Amino acid sequence: MIRIEGLNVRLSDFQLRDIHLAVEKNGFFALMGPTGAGKTVLLEAIAGLVPIQSGRICIGDREVTGLPPEKRGIGIVYQDHALFPHQTVWDNIRYGLHFHKVRHDDAVKRSERLIDLLQISHILKRLPVHLSGGEKQRVALARALMVAPEVLLLDEPLSALDPNFREEVRDSLKDLHKSSNTTFLMVTHDFSDALFLAERAAVINQGRIEQNGETMDVFRHPTSLFTAEFVGMKNVFPAMFEGARAVVGHLKIELSAPVEGPKRYLSVRPEDVVISRESASTNGCTPLKGEIKRVVDHGFYFSISVKTRGVIFQSLMPKSMFLDTDPRDWKEAYVHVRPSTLHMF
């Protein structure tokens, strides 16, 4: 549905460089990256809001590179909602119909469906000033989808919301995507939102795409140091590889199979690192004895750092795994990592 080929954009001292991306029809795609990476610039280039130097943008079978924004069949929702303050919710939702020819019966059915899905029937007569953050975001979504765009671009749609509203709007987004024929492309710096919503994702850094693919694969199998750190891998170590063994500092770690091709790093997600007081080997793990360096209580889980032979492993473990003991009282512990959870790149 969305195809971007060799896109280059220059804005002042920032540049998007050689962007290649493809988003399937009716897919939900997440574009992730830190602040200043170029996420919003790419979104606005797709929408036709910033000029491009070179490259092609296609929506479906149409090349839209040279078309004005209103001819591209694209809706866009910004994180600040951009609702008209002097218009009611109902007027905001129907605003786009002034510029798109939609049969009256179709418009009525579409508005009723969106209002029901987004649960905003009780606020239709309110002005935006009297809405919560979550309500404003749902109204902005309804307004964008009212004209049935082929593509909906979402610029950090959840970042400005408190946790309760965030979950409500995230659920609404998932329901909207399932019930529409619209292709969603969402910009976010929060990988938990990407995991919940998107089937495929890309990571952008300093105007270049670092990696793209299935969302879970990007998280579990990063191909660069930047991507690994951005998606919260936590345990990323420079390593040398000797057959089915990795050498990290003074540690020798068994792998599930010999390493093929040149690799420079060994990594493992913190939720795959188990910390215990037991030295017994389980599930093919070779326990590594170490010193507890830090334990942070996050409410439902602990973040634990253990130093073993100069290497620090970081773990995230639910409190339910500790039963009647508290790791904050420990001095030493064993690190357990299954070979199947190790990733090399």
Image (cartoon, rainbow, N blue to C red):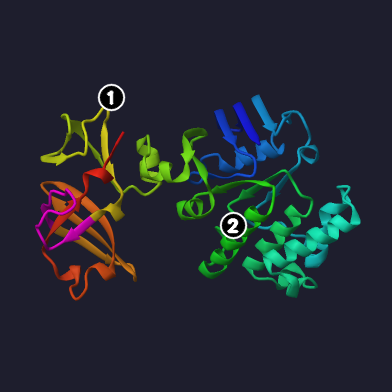
Instruction: Tell me residue 63's x, y (percent).
Output: 72, 28
Mark 1 surroundings within 10 Å by alpha-carbon count, few (fewer than 14), some (14 through 19), many (20 or more): few
Instruction: Specify the segment rendered in magenta.
Output: 274-291
Q: Residue at x 34, y 70 (%)?
A: 300
Amino acid beneath label 2: Lys
Asked whether, in this view, residue 331 is left or right of residue 131, the answer is left
Name the residue carrying label 2.
174
Name the residue carrying label 1.
261
Amino acid beneath label 1: Gly
Mark 2 surroundings within 10 Å by alpha-carbon count, few (fewer than 14), some (14 through 19), many (20 or more): some
The secondary structure type at the circle numbered 1 is loop
Nearest to the observer: residue 244 or residue 166 = 244
Asked whether, in this view, residue 204 is left or right of residue 45, the answer is left
Q: Is residue 53 visible?
A: no
Q: Is residue 254 visible?
A: yes
Instruction: Tell me residue 289's x, y (percent).
Output: 10, 54
